[in-house]
Amino acid sequence: MSKKLRNHDEVVLEQLQNPEMAKAYLEVALEEYEQDGELSFFLEALRNVVEARFGMTHFAEKTGLNRQNLYRALSAEGNPELRTISLVLHNLGYRLSVQPISTVSGQ
């Protein structure tokens, strides 16, 4: 009796199909970006959520974005415009928001 082992990526993609899990994952990735200034982890997280929820080809069709440009924008080397990130988040069912930082001096 052999049990099929799944790799880490398969498990993560399966979990990201859940909108609440995907939201938490994106929030952690955004927090990482805020701490270290490296956008690549957040872009990878966005790409993983897109892959898990829709697949890149279907998502590109859904958003009207070119599939190759979408892959490029959400790659580790990507440098997407804010409107692209906003469009991706919106079509995933999320939006950008601004929240106060309690540790900012002068408040």
Image (cartoon, rainbow, N blue to C red):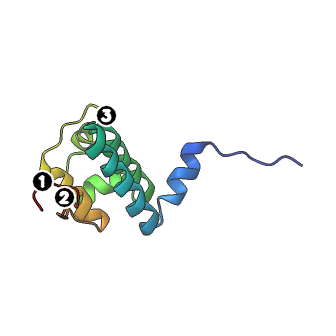
State the residue lying farthest toward the front: 106
Residue 103 spot, x, y in % from top left: 22, 56
- On screen, residue 103 versus residue 24, left or right, reads left
Residue nearest the observer in this picture, 67 or 10:
10
SS at mark 3 in the image: loop
Instruction: Measure the alpha-carbon separation of dots 2 and 1.
Output: 6 Å
Q: Position of residue 45 (x, y in %)?
A: 37, 48
Do we see residue 94 in this rendering?
A: yes
Q: Please, what is the three-letter code of the amino acid marked with disc 1? A: Arg
Q: What residue sits right under mark 2 in the picture?
A: 87
Q: Which residue is mark 3?
A: 76
Q: Which residue is mark 1?
A: 83
Residue at x-position 38% and y-position 63%:
23
Which image quadrant is residue 95 in? bottom left
Amino acid type, mark 3: Ala
Answer whether labels 3 and 1 touch (C-beta < 8 Å). no
Q: Are marks 2 and 1 in contact (CB under 8 Å)?
A: yes
The mark that comes first in sequence, 3 or 1, is 3
The Cα atoms of the two marked residues, 3 and 2, are separated by: 18 Å
Tag 2: amino acid = Leu
